[in-house]
Image (cartoon, helix red, strand yellow):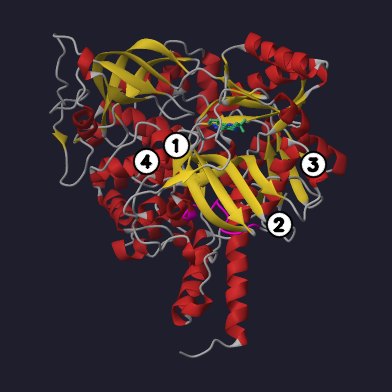
Amino acid sequence: MSQPEQKTLDEVATLRAELDDANYRYYVLDEPRMTDADYDRRLRRLQEIEAEYPDLVTPDSPTQRVGAPPDAGFPEVQHAVPMLSLDNALNEDEITAFVKRVADRLEIDGETIAFCCEPKLDGAAVSLVYEQGVLVSGATRGDGRTGEGITSNLRTLRSIPLKLRGKALPDLLEVRGEVIMSHEGFEALNAKAREEDAKVFANPRNAAAGSLRQLDPKITASRPLEFSAYQVARIDMARIDDSLLSTHSKQMKRLREWGFRVSQQLEVVTGSQGLIDYCRRLGERRDRLGYDIDGVVIKVDDLRLQRELGFVARAPRWAIAFKFPAQEQTTTLNDVEFQVGRTGAITPVARLEPVTVAGVTVSNASLHNADEIARLGVMIGDTVTIRRAGDVIPQVVRVETSLRPEDAREIVFPERCPVCDSEVERLEGEVVARCSGGLYCGAQRKEALKHFASRRALDIEGLGEKLIEALVERDWVKTPADLFRLDAECLASLPRMAQKSSDNLVAALDKAKRTTLARFVFALGIREVGEATAANLARHFGTLDALMGAEVADLEAVEDVGPVVAAHVHTFFRQPHNRDTIDELRALGLTWKEEAIGERPQPLAGQTWVLTGTLESMTRDEGKERLQALGAKVAGSVSKKTAAVVAGPGAGSKLGKAEQMGVPVLDEEGFLERLEAWESGRETEQ
Ligand code: D41
């Protein structure tokens, strides 16, 4: 076998450093730099070189995450230090009592004690051992003393460093933390499983734990899992100044530097009021975090005080878990109704006996489709477990068949549309049943009009849901073109419409006539054509006529347009009634700025933005995506180079830092105004 040249050795070192760095930026700093495509390209190049020179392969090479053969079973692993459990505090008084217990035992004033607070992630606890900075073993918690060795599976998580970053590394390090699946990852995994008739998980915790217990690491690798560290269980610090590690929060900071993801919500507070405030604040943010948490873990920050406090039975005296209300509850399924969506999709909706789930009253839940009803084996009258998390619609996750009443009824999927009585079709290979009525169907018409008028489409101010329903029910509006034929006088005759609001609506309709091609294409409501695809289509074809005349092959040449989307777009523009509506809209004076073919306008290119605190009108992720679509990078921390900080309520140190450094700060209103101006192309630079 030939020996690699120096050039190849250098390339290998660079590729590994770049791949490790990409993971670190993505998972730890929350500041991705490299696209997935670039990551995959580098990984493949490294694989090629290593295939040619197998001697270059090291266990900590990024290529070695997947590659271990399926295990026959998992070995037992004794934890060198037991993984303890946590006592619970069920209300604020129990937090105060905890502080008092700690203070009494230490004989100091409780209000001066510093506590480190962090979310209690709801996933699967694992322990990782690093020797000389290299990951050597990983295990589940098990019963706290003995877990299962799942090293090959844990190696596949890109948020678990295969080797620690930096120079001053401990000889031995044991890190504990939680493996979680985000809501987004969980929904995507289940959506795919439903399509493929594979195992559907009841919640992200089961999905995370189940994914870690796969015998084939390739399956684990395909699951959207993330590791977040929460404890240094053992550290051999021969070469490390231990004054830097005198508190839990300093240890967490050091773990971040070594390449671990640590909760961004970690905060050090003082006294019982500090703890209660933190728990309230996190409780308010719970729905917007994007992953499940079941409470707050509170730890005495000072490690010396921790040692002084010690343990009782199997729980530390220096920590407690404050529990939030459960995200799952049981209730009764009273009935099932069938809703018709914009594209005719018929969705069964569970009508439930109202129940409070994680602080919100829930009386409806999604049942997805006929296959899901069959999978759950659910009947009307059953006791069901429902789950509510984040902004996901509550879901029925389980049926208590043992509690089924004698008069339980089977759920019958309708053969005709409940709104327009057209036939319901279910195409070969599709899980979704659809009403075949198209715009003849009142439900589809209402939804299509709502979409047409919505903020990100034509943005017709004042044309809300109730008004659209009234217009459709009176048959005044059959197509979007009919909207522009409404006059103030007849609008004013509608219930709850005064002269002033009908005048305003006519003015809003007039204003909406001037739009952009991208918004117009999005507004048409073509199946599978979201905002991003509409923008790509507009940019690629430049004019509506070019888009309308495009053949399937032309459409497939557009960025992110595959055969399915291309077919939907092509079919849409071949329908005579759609072409007629477009002609009418043009005749009524609708105009749009046609896009320059080619580059997407990126007014924020080269700028780095920071989002902090909570936003009301969108999730932080949505804000991030919208900024990124305009060319900005979105970072997790403020520096001199930060272009602007968007600060919502609850903004913490980042806001202070921005003000200190003279970085411009926008509130949500100001942010929305600028976003919309840039997105509509009204403004081209900051
Ligand atoms: O997020 C968690 N699930 C979490 C669990 C956390 N952030 N911190 C934790 N800290 C501990 C101690 C105080 C014992 C170091 C924990 C747990 N324990 C824990 N998880 C399951 C049992 C105990």
Residue pointed to by mark 4: 210
- Residue visible at 82% across and 39% down? 657
Give the mark nearest the N terminus, 2 or 3.
2
> What kind of residue is marked 3?
Pro
Give the mark nearest the N terminus, 2 or 4.
2
Q: Quadrant of the N terminus?
A: bottom left
Residue pointed to by mark 3: 664
Q: Mark 1 and mark 4: span between their CA atoms? A: 14 Å
Nearer to us of marks 2 and 3 is 2
Give neighbour class at mark 4: few <14, some 14-19, many 20+ (Cα, 10 Å).
few
Residue pointed to by mark 2: 169
Residue pointed to by mark 1: 142
Give neighbour class at mark 1: few <14, some 14-19, many 20+ (Cα, 10 Å).
some
Q: Position of residue 304 (x, y in %)?
A: 77, 32
Asked whether disc 1 touches disc 3, contact meaning CB atoms under 8 Å apart, the reply is no
Name the secondary structure under disc 1: loop
Asked whether disc 2 touches disc 4, contact meaning CB atoms under 8 Å apart, the reply is no
> What kind of residue is marked 1?
Gly
- Residue visible at 47% across and 60% down? 65
Q: Mark 4 and mark 3: span between their CA atoms? A: 46 Å
Left or right, 585 with reference to 160: left
- Residue visible at 50% across and 15% down? 359
Nearer to us of marks 1 and 4 is 1
Give the mark nearest the N terminus, 1 or 3.
1
> What kind of residue is marked 4?
Gly
Name the secondary structure under disc 4: helix
Residue interval drawn in magenta:
155-164
Above-or-below relation of 441 to 427? above
Above-or-below relation of 371 to 635? above
Q: Position of residue 547 (x, y in %)?
A: 38, 57
- Residue visible at 18% across and 9% down? 405
Q: Mark 2 and mark 4: span between their CA atoms? A: 33 Å
